[in-house]
Image (cartoon, rainbow, N blue to C red):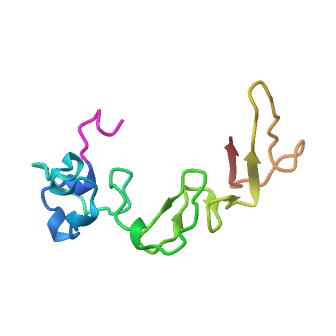
Amino acid sequence: MCHAIGQMHEQSRSDRDKYIDMHWNNIRGGTGNNNMHKENTRDNNPYDAESVLQYSLYVNHCQNPPNCQNGGFLNFQCVCVCPDGLTGSTCEQIADACGGIITLTPGQTEEIKSPNYPSPYPQGTKCTWLLK
């Protein structure tokens, strides 16, 4: 979707060389890799090395990297960065006291109830549910 609205890969920014060093011998296809070419971009925001539009920069230097789950990804420190609401070394846990992870098979249903059901729950309670 980001490409559909005109966004380019972070490593293709015209100002990328101010922020990262390209080690072409470590890149499949080297300088011929079209995904790594710089584009004429308007760079109004800071370079985001952990953007969803940034190809992995760091994975090859990690020794025994964790297997990030549930949409988490490996950052430059070889640690999983988890989506909002998830935590744990591999993003395998719900960060909030309320919620959970539900794994469903095709055709299976599950009822999700608010905390303290059927009584009201405290105002401001945040619940995170991950449905798989």
Q: Where is residue 65 in the image (x, y as percent from the top left)?
A: 53, 69
Horizontally, residue 122 falls left or right of residue 31, namely right
Q: Is residue 26 above or below residue 13?
A: below
Residue 3 magenta-drawn? yes
- Nearest to the observer: residue 44 or residue 77: 77
Q: Is residue 19 above or below residue 33?
A: below
Residue name at image x 14 percent, y 61 percent: 15
Horizontally, residue 124 falls left or right of residue 66, namely right
Question: What are the residue bounds of the magenta stretch?
Answer: 1-8
Q: Where is residue 125 in the image (x, y as percent from the top left)?
A: 71, 55
Quadrant for the N terminus, please. Answer: top left
Residue name at image x 18 percent, y 62 percent: 16
Horizontally, residue 24 falls left or right of residue 63, namely left
- How many marks can you see? 0
- Nearest to the observer: residue 26 or residue 94: 26
Horizontally, residue 97 falls left or right of residue 20, namely right
Residue name at image x 27 percent, y 59 percent: 27
Q: Is residue 5 above or below residue 92?
A: above
Q: List the single residue furthest toward the left.
A: 40
Residue name at image x 75 percent, y 41 percent: 103
Residue 37 magenta-drawn? no
